[in-house]
Amino acid sequence: EAQVTQNPRYLITVTGKKLTVTCSQNMNHEYMSWYRQDPGLGLRQIYYSMNVEVTDKGDVPEGYKVSRKEKRNFPLILESPSPNQTSLYFCASSLQGTYQPQHFGDGTRLSIL
Amino acid sequence: DAKTTQPPSMDCAEGRAANLPCNHSTISGNEYVYWYRQIHSQGPQYIIHGLKNNETNEMASLIITEDRKSSTLILPHATLRDTAVYYCIVRVNNAGNMLTFGGGTRLMVKP
């Protein structure tokens, strides 16, 4: 089954403790992206990747890192999480860029205390 | 990318057609109209997209006015499971960069 898989689905952690949210897709998609969703602010793009070893900043990249060493994986790294990064996070992928249908994961709900 | 305007909320009776409008008066000639929806807090789901011709797929129909300044997403027979936030996005159809979601329309399908 074609899917985008995020882990963990839920995480409660403390300020400053490094964490990684993994994202994996099994559709051989070139484009992958991370979004965060906050009440009243909607979905905002954090980072995206056009292909392996190619990443670019989205609207709200501060405090986040990403890497794209393999086509199928696009982890989101919070080196020193802070409470303002408490949010619902979504990973998405598409064959080539955002002009093609995006496939989204089920989301990761992060709480930073 | 052109800005879009959608009503914040709409109601629809189950079994009836749901018509969701979107205004994009500043759209340019090479910008496509995309629709996604998000059911509760699940990941958004792609519905349909088009440039200037009307489009139909198994989920919905997309009607774009001749001047392309507005469009309507039609769910022909709405069910309770169609209750969701529907996002209209306008962007240039090229490979890459960002996708910007606006506020969307919260559609409530009622029995």
Image (spheres, coloured by chain):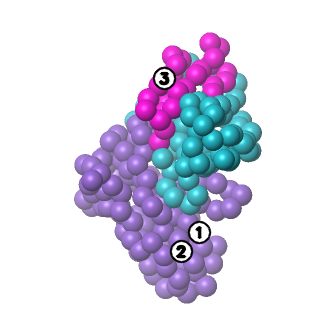
Chain colours: A purple, B cyan
Q: Nearer the viewer, residue A108 or A82?
A: A108
- Would residue A70 appear left or right of B13 to someone viewing this image? left
Q: Is residue B64 visible?
A: yes
Say which residue label 3 marks. B55
In the rendered image, the vertical position of residue B34 relative to residue A58, given as above or below? above
Q: Secondary structure at mark 2?
A: strand
Let me know if residue A80 appears in the view: no
- Crowd tier of the residue under label 1, counting other residues whose Cα lies within 10 Å: few below 14, some 14–19, many 20 or above: some
Q: Amino acid at mark 1?
A: Ser
Nearest the viewer among A13 and A105 is A105
From the top left corner, tell me how far across and down residue A107 is, in percent: 48, 63
Contact between labelled residues 2 and 1, with CB atoms less than 8 Å apart: yes
Graded by Cα atoms within 10 Å as few (under 14), some (14 to 19) or many (20 or more), the crowding at tag 2 reads: some
Which region of the structure is painted magenta?
Answer: B46-73
Label 1 secondary element: strand
Give the image location of residue B93, x and y in percent. Answer: 46, 29
Q: Nearer the viewer, mark 3 or mark 2?
A: 3
Q: Residue B1 magenta-drawn?
A: no
Amino acid at pointer 2: Leu
Rendering coords of residue A27 (x, y %):
27, 49
Tell me the residue at 32%/42% (across/down). A95
- Give, as a three-letter code, the residue at label 3: Glu
Judge by depth and name the residue closer to the eye, A32 or A107: A107
Q: Is B96 on the left or on the right of B62, as rendered?
A: left
Residue B54 is one of the magenta-drawn residues: yes
**Which quadrant holds residue B20?**
top right
Which chain is home to disc 2? A
Q: Chain of mark 3?
A: B
Establish if B47 lies above or below A41.
Answer: above
Q: Residue at x 27, y 61 (%)?
A: A69
To which residue does mark 2 refer? A110
How far apart, in angstroms, are the residues tagged by discs 3 and 1? 35 Å
